[in-house]
Amino acid sequence: MSQIAFITGATSGFGAACARVFAAHGWSLVLCGRRLERLETLRIELAGAVSVHAFALDIRDELAVNTAIAALPSAFAEVDVLVNNAGLALGLEPAQRCDMEDWQRMIDTNIKGLLYCTRALLPGMVSRNRGHIVNVGSVAGSYPYPGGNVYGATKAFVQQFSLNLRADLLGTRVRVTNVEPGLAESEFSLVRYKGDDDKAARTYEGTEPLRPDDIADIVYWAATRPGHVNLNRIEVMPVCQAFSPFAIHREA
Ligand code: NDP
Ligand code: 8X3
């Protein structure tokens, strides 16, 4: 029987790339995201080769998450790997100018949505004594940058939650990994800049960013290490990216 990967945010970017990599290795897939049409296109693309269960889901809706997971068809119910990938950044303004609704949406999606999915699938993994939660964090969870305010803080939550999960899971064979990418080209910047194509394109101008396929390879690799190996964190940047010096404000 093939293994089952449950991927959130499969309509775009890393999530869609993960779906294709797991499918290429014969895994059955549970795919969700809010844009049903895209899921349907992906399901049709992959369904010839592997079994795919795809449905629209807003992970901010706790009841919808619990209902969808409770209603998984039996062939998809025993999830081996949960890829908690769905997430977003909104805006790059300094905190004093940020929109509270943007902050709330990032918290509701990147933190609370990830928790709902994890909490719903974890008991089954523990009772089967088998499973892997792969969270998609970010370098923004470790390194501050101007305008990263709440987005970075949500990813810091994901990083610490991943480590604390593993602490709770000690004694089980359920694994937890936080994959922490840097600059990667996807629809991420288009969402961050609220549909402004020019600003989004400028983010990647003159760079060779990570590609969704790079992240999917890493997620798949982490999920397929021998069962006694737990990768706690994987931080990855494109070669064109590095760290800033500390910023020092000097009076004129
Ligand atoms: P994309 O914008 O291309 O993809 C984001 C995915 O998340 C989409 O499939 C979207 O689906 C889904 N999503 C967003 N909100 C919700 C929601 N409420 N319910 C369900 N699904 C949702 O960006 P990436 O692929 O780049 O981002 C994937 C993850 O990687 C995110 O967690 C992001 O923070 C993280 N990341 C991205 C980096 C980058 O530079 N690109 C670097 C580091 C981390 P839909 O809109 O259909 O619901
Ligand atoms: C996305 C990477 O540097 O834009 O998590 O925060 S960054």
Image (cartoon, rainbow, N blue to C red):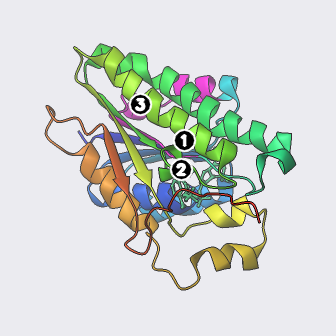
Q: Amino acid at mark 3?
A: Ser
Residue tagged 3: 162
Q: Is residue 37 magenta?
A: no
* Magenta stretch in the rendered image: 65-86
Residue tagged 2: 140
Mark 1 or mark 3, which is nearer the start of the sequence?
A: 1
Q: Is mark 2 within 8 Å of ligand 2?
A: yes
Answer few, some or many: residues within 10 Å of disc 3's Cα (few below 14, many 20 plus, some between 14 and 19): many
Whether residue 24 is situated above or below residue 206 in the rendered picture: above
Q: What is the x, y in percent for residue 236?
A: 37, 58
Label 2, label 3: how many angstroms apart (C-alpha)?
Answer: 15 Å
- Are discs 1 and 2 less than 8 Å apart at CB? yes
Mark 3 or mark 2, which is nearer the start of the sequence?
A: 2
Task: Tell whether 1 sits left or right of 213.
Answer: left
Residue tagged 1: 155
Whether residue 160 is situated above or below residue 168 in the rendered picture: below
Label 3, label 1: how many angstroms apart (C-alpha)?
Answer: 10 Å
Whether residue 120 is situated above or below residue 237 in the rendered picture: above
Of 234 and 51, nearer the camera is 234
Q: Residue furthest front?
A: 252
Does residue 77 show up? yes
Q: What is the x, y in percent for residue 184?
A: 50, 66
Report the image quarter containing ligand 2.
bottom right
Residue at (37% x, 72% y) in the render: 239
Label 1, label 2: how many angstroms apart (C-alpha)?
Answer: 6 Å
Q: Amino acid at mark 1?
A: Lys
Q: Amino acid at mark 2?
A: Ala
Answer with the quarter of the image where residue 173 lies.
top left
Answer with the quarter of the image where residue 105 lies.
top right
In the structure shown, which secondary structural element does the residue marked by tag 1 occupy? helix
Answer few, some or many: residues within 10 Å of disc 2's Cα (few below 14, many 20 plus, some between 14 and 19): many
Does residue 48 show up? no
